Amino acid sequence: MKKIYIIANWKSNKTIDEADAWLKQISSGKINFSEKEIIICPPFTLLSFFKQKLNTNNLGISLGSQNVSPFEKGAYTGEINAQQVNEFVKYVIIGHSERRINFKEDDSMLEAKVKQTNKYGLTPIYCVQNEKTFIPQGVTIVAYEPPTAIGTGHPDTPQNANFVAHQIKNRNPQIDIILYGGSVSSQNISSFITQEHISGVLVGGASLDASKFLELITSSTL
Ligand code: PGA
């Protein structure tokens, strides 16, 4: 049976107090998280907090970051490099459409980010907007996220997401895990993860509320 990935992308949300309340609620849910690969990607400011808590409470949840510098350490004001990120997380989201649109990240910058993650032993989760989006060497996990589905309540159909995932695999044989993202909820998660070429989901809005996120995890049956 395929391993299911559920990735929570918190975007620019939550303070330490809010993250603490969320984690307390998640821990009280008495769910065995380790059957699936659950990855929380909070803002950088919460990585230290999460690392400490997840080490002590053994929930079986992994950590990811939402971004990484395309550069090595040095004179790059405001950037956080892959060596630093590697002190906290295993995964890094790269190429989310919000970064492509709001921060003008292009293919060559995203490729440089992937190179940095590879160099420092991190696993990139590379977001693509359609089957034709360029995917750099060194990527093994891809998240298909059509921009019209992000935060709109209008997800792609599971059948089309599966079709796109299949095309991505055909065009990029090195990719072994494809996730779907965009308006995923506890109501629709199973319809995506039961598709042949989809191994999990990237979740934004529905991951911010602990009870909704718990419901999403318990609804993710194959
Ligand atoms: P959404 O966001 O679940 O709120 O649509 C998904 C994403 O941006 O990764």
Image (spheres, rainbow, N blue to C red):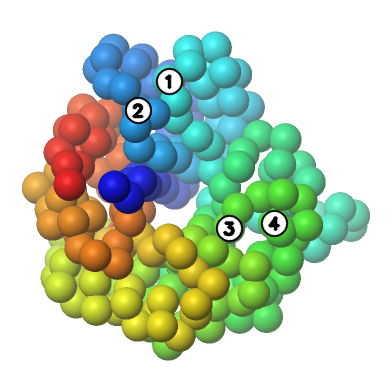
CA separation in Å, label 3 and label 2: 21 Å
Crowd rating for badge 4 (residues with CA inside 10 Å; few <14, some 14–19, many 20+): many
Q: Which residue is mark 2?
A: 33
CA separation in Å, label 3 and label 4: 6 Å
Q: Which residue is mark 3?
A: 124
Check disc 4 and report its element: helix, strand or loop: helix
- The response on whether ligand 1 sits within 8 Å of label 1 is no
In the visual, does 131 lie left or right of 82? left
In the image, residue 152 sits, relative to residue 41, either above or below, namely below
Residue 155 point in image, percent of width and height: 18, 65
In the image, residue 191 sits, relative to residue 175, either above or below, namely above
Q: Amino acid at mark 2?
A: Phe
- Pointer 2 and pointer 1: residues touching (CB < 8 Å)? yes
Q: Earlier in the sequence, mark 3 or mark 2?
A: 2
CA separation in Å, label 2 and label 1: 6 Å
Residue 117, disc: 4
Q: Earlier in the sequence, mark 2 or mark 4?
A: 2
Q: Amino acid at mark 4?
A: Thr
Check disc 3 and report its element: helix, strand or loop: strand
Residue sitting at the far right:
74
Residue 56 point in image, percent of width and height: 54, 12
- Quarter of the displayed picture in which ligand 1 can be seen: bottom left
Question: Which residue sits at x=43%, y=34%?
Answer: 14
In the visual, does 96 lie left or right of 25? right
CA separation in Å, label 1 and label 4: 25 Å
Q: Amino acid at mark 3?
A: Pro
Is residue 88 at all visible to an observer of this figure? yes
In the visual, does 72 lie left or right of 168? right
